[in-house]
Image (cartoon, grey):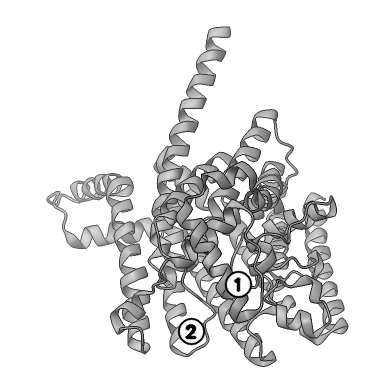
Amino acid sequence: MEEKKNTAWAFLITAGLILTSIVYYMTDVYYIYLIVYIWFGYAYGMMLQYGRFCFASASRDLFAAGVPRMAVGIMIALIFFSVIQAILAATNMSTFHAAPFGIHMLISGSVFGVGMVLAGGCASGSLYKVGEGNMTSLLAVVFGLCLGQAIFVDVGGIFNKLVPQSWIDSAHRTQAAIKAYQGIDIPINSWFDHYLVGYVWNQPQYTIAKLISGGQPDTIHYFIGNALINSILPAIVILCVIYYFYSRKTFMKKKKKALKKQGLPEITGFKDELSGIWGMITASKRTSIMGVLVGITAGLHILTMAGMQKKFGVLNFGDLLKRMGHTADVSLKGTVFDPGYWYITSQEGQVGAWILEKFGWNMHDNMFFGYVNGLPELWRNPALWMSLGIILGAMVMARLQNEFKFKLPSPELIMWGFSGGLLMGFGSRPSLGCNIGGFFIRASGGDPNGWVYGTGMVLGAFIGVKFFNWWTERKMAKEMAAM
């Protein structure tokens, strides 16, 4: 009976998305751009839930339990995605762009890493877990990724006194230049405005392909520089390190036992090491297969969005919103948040800003919403529909797998979900990305920034795991003392 109920829910949710897509298309053909985001989000959600894909789980499983399954799956996805990104870049069908390089990536990655462990899920993991009925993850999404981010980028006052004078001077020089050349008076009010305009915008942007080609990359540079040097080789090194510290001992013990049983010398060589690494990769077929599919799907997403932009002759969905008459949705420069690929956190921040504006808080007076990303109505926000698609796709897969369960959090989990979500929100904004946009997309796209952010994220996750171990031991000691 329960299985039939879950199947019915899965079909009902999917039918609802199909109906929504039809309504959008019938309203205006330009909304097909938004519909693409819906269905790629749906696909991501199904794959994330089926493969249990979560960067927080990968860190927690590795550091706390010594289980490498999820970390291995992420590296596999990154390798496949890097090759696809190289193909797209070489054929001028990529929407990827590198991010400003700097120490801020390491710092913000560390904050995000702690947050995702405390919340029990990374940005993408929290979304798919909401689809499974996990209300702790919903707290992390609503109060951290939505409201926390929005407040984070808009506060000024005493926080502005902490901003270095060099950022302030640089921000106001840029403000004057944009007003002179574009006629736009950009809002420089919050601490984040000074940070973004006065510091981040001054940092260089790199891809390995551009570095090794002198700024004019050809096809070979995308494959050798972006894919091989920046993505595949580091991923292989990480797989070897994971194997050596977490899988090799067990594998070699079994191998020598098998040799002894056959009456052969207990000697192993390089071929056995390769077998051990391959055994580690294939230990969880479900996660490894999803890693391959996630990489391929992320590449197809970029290809499709590039095709949409060429079809309509635009570079941003804001141009289409203006054609449809929704000028209030776009930023001062006529854009909305439209990454063109898999991305999370910025659209959640827009939800928080949208809510706060309904209560009278002006969210257009900062750079993040006012000039860069805009603040569209929720139903006209393309990237937000991608996040909703992830939740609903995960819900469908959880229903089909009979894994959906509505779980109310305990008071302690409320604390972890709230605090972890805030740290994820705070850690994603200075780096302009999270575990997906800050690490996965950039590392596989040839941007060394991805590895800087990823290093910070791993360090933060390690600290988060150690903190949790300390907290658990302390709690158990108190309970034993009480008994």
The percent position of residue 79, horizontal first and vertical second, equals: 41, 69
Task: Say which residue appears at 43% left-offset and 34% top-offset.
Answer: 466
Q: What element carries label 1?
A: loop
Where is 245 relative to 346, above or below? above
- Residue 356, horizontal then vertical, whole percent: 78, 51
* Residue behind mark 2: 88
10 Å crowding of disc 1: few (<14), some (14-19), many (20+): many
Q: What residue type is labelled 2?
A: Leu
Give the tally of numbered discs.
2
Residue at image mark 1: 339
State the CA–CA distance, disc 2 to disc 1: 16 Å
Q: Where is residue 360 in the image (x, y as percent from the top left)?
A: 83, 51
Q: Position of residue 10 (x, y in %)?
A: 77, 61
Which kind of residue does numbered mark 1 sit on?
Pro
Q: Is 373 on the left or on the right of 380, as rendered?
A: left
Name the residue rendered at 44%, 49% in the picture. 107
Q: From the image, state whether disc 2 or disc 1 is nearer to you.
A: 1
Q: Which of marks 2 and 1 is nearer the N terminus?
A: 2
Specify whether residue 116 is in view.
yes
Left or right: where 66 falls relative to 4: left
Numbered tag placed on residue 478 in the rendering: none
The C terminus: image quadrant: top right
